[in-house]
Amino acid sequence: MSSSSRPRAAFAQLSCAALAVATLVAACGSPVASPTPERTEQATTAPIATPTTMAGGPITGLGPLGRATYETPAPFAPVFAFDIRADGWRSITEPDEFGFVLATPNAVNPEALMGVVTPTATTIEQFSGEMANTGFLDGTETVADVTIDGIAARSISIRRTTPNEAFTIHSPNGIVETSFGGELSDNRFVYVAHPDGPFVVLLNMAADGDVEVRFVFDALVDSIAFR
């Protein structure tokens, strides 16, 4: 989620030519001028997101994700497009009909997790109730009912400094319980009640994490367009 041999060869040829000219001048008794140092290119500021050659389309599990528009994996329902607007994200699960999860900078030591998962809860209220029953919600959460491309959704944000079971999801291994909190204590979930199948867009990051990560998450959610 990139040739320098020709410039070096050309420079070598120029150097040899300059040396030959200098030798002839010296033979005639003229002083030899010191070679002019090669100019150092001015440093440039790196953009927030570097363009990538990876084409937009169904998300891939290989390589970094750059600024582009992607679609959900082929078997995933509902089908929708979304934007990833920053480099550094890598897929840590093989995208399938249950969704995908991205990590930055890597799965071993993630600074943040972001992804789309398929919950077992079939309604917004059931999803909120499940999170309350597991004890994940403790009254300090921020809850807002919103719409995503015209579809009813609910955003839940909470900060937990200790890990706790949150809600169950469908996975290739069947139904599994998810756990969030701890080191990645800033947790946000957006449950989307799409008629073709509900899904959850999630973000988990350290409380003092880069604000850019939140921007990327908000941009992803705001960019969702169903097909």
Image: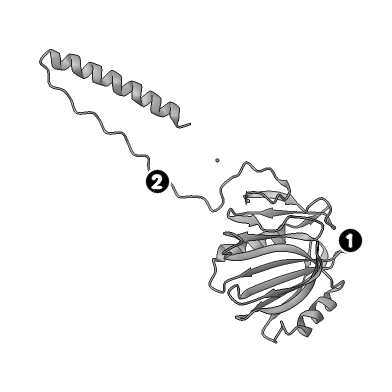
Report if residue 214 is visible in the image. Answer: no
Rendered image quadrant of residue 145? bottom right
Distance Cα–Cα, label 1 vs label 2: 50 Å
Disc sitting over residue 137 in the figure: none
Amino acid type assigned to the residue bearing label 2 in the image: Ala
The residue beneath circle 2 is: 43
Tell me, yes or no, if residue 129 can be seen here: yes
SS for dot 2: loop
In the rendered image, residue 10, in percent from the top left (x then y), is placed at 39, 24
What residue sits right under mark 1 in the picture?
196
Give the percent coordinates (x, y) of residue 151.
83, 65
- From this view, report whether residue 22 is shown above or below residue 57: above
Q: Mark 1 packing: few (<14 Cα in 10 Å), some, or many (20+)?
A: few
**How crowded is the residue under tag 2: few (<14 C-alpha within 10 Å), some, or many (20+)?**
few
Q: Label 1, secondary structure: give it.
A: loop
**Residue drawn 75% across and 55% down?**
95
Q: Position of residue 141 (x, y in %)?
A: 68, 81
Q: Residue at x 71, y 82 (%)?
A: 136
Q: Is residue 76 above or below residue 140?
A: above
First in sequence: mark 1 vs mark 2: 2
Residue that lies at the very extreme toward the left in this rendered image: 29
Q: Is residue 140 above or below residue 34?
A: below
Q: Is residue 109 left or right of residue 128?
A: left
Amino acid type, mark 1? Asp
Furthest-bottom residue in this view: 139
Res. 82 image quadrant: bottom right
